[in-house]
Image (tube, rainbow, N blue to C red):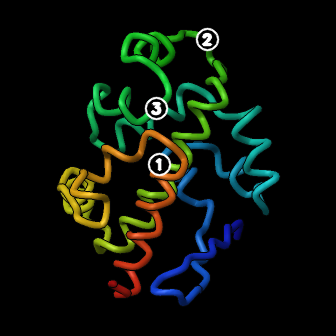
Amino acid sequence: MSQLTLYYKSNGVGGFYIMSYEFLHTMYKMPKSVVDNIHNENELINTIRNKFYAEYAKNFITFSQLSLNIWSKILPVSLSTLQRELKNTLEKHILDLSISESLVEVGEIYDIGLLAFDKDKDRLNEWLNTKNKYFNSKKPLEIMDNHKGRELVKNELIRIEYSEFA
């Protein structure tokens, strides 16, 4: 099984979180044959650059149940550009690298979040839409517009999963 090892730190104590790349198949509907060939982060980067099609983004956006308006605030693209990219009729339209990379990072957040919230997507989405003191009283979705914000959200969800609170 293809997997990713994440290092996290909580209260000065570090640990490892093993994450499977299976979320690319289950959430994005990326072919199993493509996902099974991702064994490390370099291969994940290559897949994001060369094999991340608009159809996968559409599948994940539908899976997340978040509106396109929210997605346009998370992704480095305007709402109209996002709509145009998703409506592209080319069968194998590859998205811009920054959009694809952000979508995959949010997928990692959903993968971890679903573990933390016992596979309850509604609870996860509610948590993502609730102000949190850990994020300076902002909603997690409000800080997910950049890599560091997504890392903070991911690490907080790992702490929730392993019951490590400050």
Quarter of the image that includes the N terminus = bottom right
Q: Nearer the viewer, residue 131 or 104?
A: 131
Q: Quadrant of residue 102?
A: top right
Label 1 is placed on what type of residue? Val
Q: Which residue is mark 2?
A: 90
The residue that appears at 22% across and 62% down in the rendered structure is 132
The residue that appears at 59% across and 86% down in the rendered structure is 15
Residue at disc 1, secondary structure: helix
Q: Position of residue 126 (x, y in %)?
A: 18, 56
Q: Position of residue 86 (x, y in %)?
A: 47, 19
Label 2 is placed on what type of residue? Leu
Q: Marks 3/2: CA distance? A: 21 Å
Q: Which residue is mark 3?
A: 75
Quarter of the image that includes the C terminus = bottom left
Q: Nearer the viewer, residue 110 or 91?
A: 110
Residue at disc 3, secondary structure: loop
Mark 1: few/some/many CA within 10 Å (<14, 14-19, 20+) = many
66 versus 34 height, above or below: above
